[in-house]
Image (spheres, rainbow, N blue to C red):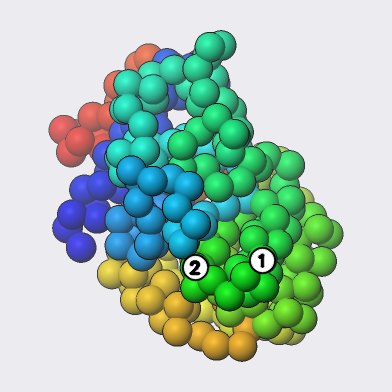
Amino acid sequence: MSDLKEIACRIRQDIIEMLLKAKSGHPGGSLSAADILAVLYFRIMNIDSANPGWSERDRFVLSKGHAAPVLYAALAEKGYFSREELQHLRQTGHFLQGHPDMKKVPGVDMSTGSLGQGISAAVGMALAGKMDQKTYKVYCLVGDGEMNEGLVWEAAMAAAHYKLDNLIGILDFNGLQIDGETEKVMNSSPLSDKWGAFGWNVLEVDGHDISALTDTLEAAKQVQGKPTMIIAKTIKGKGVSFMENQAGWHGNAPSPEQAEAALAELRGEN
């Protein structure tokens, strides 16, 4: 567990450094998902960074595609590409775009960005796995602001209809979206009841508790006959005190001074 915590911390540092260099990007929802991706990529998923196209691999879809920095940091940490590339986020002539591109970035299984489409693609990938009699799992990270999209609920209905027990969704439930609190922008609560009513197995977990995340994801892998949605309670901007629970940090890059303070905090220097 201590190794995973260290990995999550490095991922958070990479996020801050990437956004500082790019002078744009989305820190809040990237930082909130760092622990989730650390557990997925370094404990749960059956993947091989030396063979990104391996047909038997587990798949991951970042449906909240604007949080691409957390995915890029995890992929670089896992060895899919050089860490040097992280310094070229959103730069012309480099492949780490503002949203993930499956045709250019090693390890990205689905291009995402338009909210709601990622989980819809994940349903298709899971259905294909069933039809091809493959054993891989499809993991999909969705945002709570993304629950505003009707497309999400169409996908939820289809996944339950086809009994896609090879599909595991993780809801990054940080309570904030670009325009403010999710409950005030468009209240989608109670999410646990709604996903259950759509025919999904629902689990809830502290999205920053590495041990609990690991146990919950392992439990989800054993579910049969229905897809699982893990509602992970998180903190937007987690790890950087002045960014935590602040909707204003949804899509703003830190200044050099702010980045220096954030990195010092993440390194435990203050």
Q: Residue 99: image x %, image y %?
A: 60, 33
Crowding near pointer 1: few (<14 within 10 Å), some, many (20+)? few
Tell me the tag on residue 128.
1
On screen, residue 101 above or below 218: above
Tell me the tag on residue 136.
2
Secondary structure under the numbered disc 1 in the rendered image: helix
Q: Residue 164: image x %, image y %?
A: 64, 77
Tell me the tag on residue 49.
none
For the point 51% across and 26% down, which residue is it?
Answer: 96
Q: Is residue 137 visible?
A: yes
What's under tag 2, amino acid-wise?
Tyr
User: Mark 2 or mark 1: which comes first in sequence?
Assistant: 1
For the point 41% across and 81% down, which residue is it?
Answer: 219
On screen, residue 230 above or below 265: below
Q: Residue 175: image x %, image y %?
A: 59, 56
Q: Residue 181: image x %, image y %?
A: 66, 51
Secondary structure under the numbered disc 2 in the rendered image: loop
> Could you tell whether 14 is left or right of 168 in the image?
left
